[in-house]
Image (tube, helix red, strand yellow):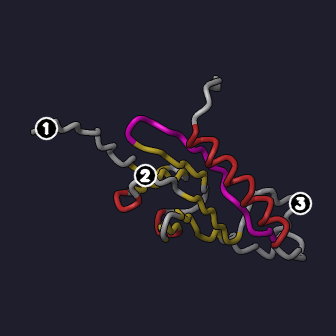
Amino acid sequence: MRSLATRPIQDLFSIHNEMSRLFDNWTRPARYRAEGESLDWLPVVDILEANEHVEIRAEIPGLSEQDVQVSVTDDVLTLRGEKTQESEDKDQKYHRVERSYGRFQRSFTLPANLAPEDIKAKFTHGVLTVSIPKVKEVEPKEIQISVE
């Protein structure tokens, strides 16, 4: 069941991802492919916000943790890797190829309230989970000054 409440960080991620997708499609040159060869692909992601952190979950089936790179440059988190197609047996002929192969890269601009230096990533059963802790907010402290 989807929540009807909106979250500011979710809106920021949604807008950024949609704009990235639009620009990627507009600037990426068309590629021709032979039968059975797939275009580069984008893993699907879920972005969740909890009280203490933001979590990005990317479905990347068919890869291991050694095949996936996670990095942060300035305030941009990048997931990248490559999924290679199994070598075709000469005695077999594909009738349909629906699985995605090739290089992928997804980038997300992190809001200022996250701590990129403390990011943790885990890869389990084809799902990459990246957890980004939120920066602890400093409570304003009032100091009474005596007037003389």
Q: Which residues are magenta?
A: 37-52
Which of discs 1 and 2 lies nearer the camera? The answer is 1
Q: Quadrant of the C terminus?
A: top left
Q: Considering depth in this image, is 86 or 78 the residue closer to the camera?
A: 78
| Residue type at the position of mark 3 | His
Q: Earlier in the sequence, mark 3 or mark 2?
A: 3
Confirm whether the magenta stretch covers residue 42.
yes
Judged left or right of residue 144, residue 19 is: right
Q: Callout 2: helix, strand or loop?
A: loop
Q: Which dot marks residue 114?
A: 2
On the image, numbered disc 3 is attached to which residue?
95
| Residue type at the position of mark 1 | Val
Q: CA distance from mark 3 to mark 2?
A: 47 Å
Q: Earlier in the sequence, mark 1 or mark 3?
A: 3
Q: Earlier in the sequence, mark 1 or mark 2?
A: 2
| Residue type at the position of mark 2 | Leu
Q: Which dot marks residue 147?
A: 1
Residue at (54% x, 64% y) in the render:
76
Q: Relative to 101, say whether 19 is above or below.
A: above
